[in-house]
Image: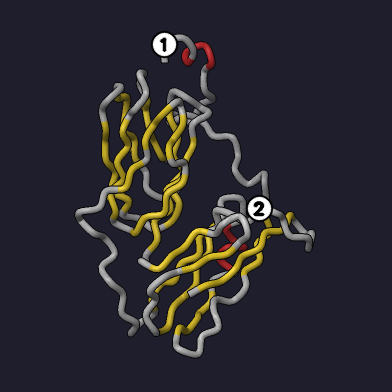
Amino acid sequence: MTGRVSLHEGNSKASLRDASKVVVWLVPAEGTRNVALVDSNVTYRMAQHNKKFVPDFLVVPVGAQVEFPNLDPWFHSVFSLYQGKRFDLGLYEAGSRKKVEFDRPGPSYIFCNIHPEMSAVVLAVESDYWAISGKDGRVAIPNVPDGKYVLHVWYANADEKELNSLERPVEINSASQGLPPISIAANPQHAAQHKNKYGHDYDPDVLEPVY
């Protein structure tokens, strides 16, 4: 099943050139069969490398485990306390790894308590049928069985109320012409500066030479 999303800034009707990283997924409605969401043999991975999360964006089914290996020669302290799955992995050294089960749907905003420049998002969805848009805004969700679904959309730089307003029922069958067009107002100021896991500003004097 294919479709296209477009981004525009604020009240402007002009489309932005880069419409990537918009997630579109289909949640089966009552009576529509879905396959098992979580494969116990699959572990997703978000590494810490060069003071970055790699990758810095993951989409996983609800209930999936994500591994957080530390590939840097210094300590990290990964946490998510603002929305979605809340966890605090504490301080862990180079070469070690920890796992988190993302058992709550929605976005989890992830940071490091030592390095304020590190940020990432894990989006847990209640479906196996999802896609991430490319720069041209195109999405393709493979192997969607016929049936009724609810279409959901998520984009990091968009207001939650607007994203909720884009939810709509869709029906997939042999006569389907694709997903309905999706237009989102991008809000670059949506992602605010974050605090550390104690709710305080980061202390630059503590960060530098050791870690």
Camera-side mark, 1 or 2: 2
Position of 175 with respect to 79 (left or right) is right
Position of 203 with respect to 188 (left or right) is left
Q: Position of residue 110 (x, y in %)?
A: 44, 39
Position of 63 with respect to 197 (left or right) is left
Q: In the image, is residue 157 above or below residue 118?
A: below
Per the image, label 1 sits on a secondary structure element best described as loop
Q: Amino acid at mark 1?
A: Val
Q: How many marks?
A: 2
Query: Which residue is drawn at the image coordinates 51% and 60% (left, top)?
Result: 23
Q: Position of residue 130 (x, y in %)?
A: 43, 65
Badge 2: few (under 14), some or many (20 or more) residues near its Cα, within 10 Å?
some
Residue beneath disc 2: 18
Query: Which residue is drawn at the image coordinates 66% and 53% (left, top)?
Result: 18
Q: Position of residue 160 (x, y in %)?
A: 57, 58
Query: Which residue is drawn at the image coordinates 46% and 9% (left, top)?
Result: 209
Q: Amino acid at mark 2?
A: Asp
Return the mark for residue 210: 1
Q: Position of residue 117 (x, y in %)?
A: 53, 29
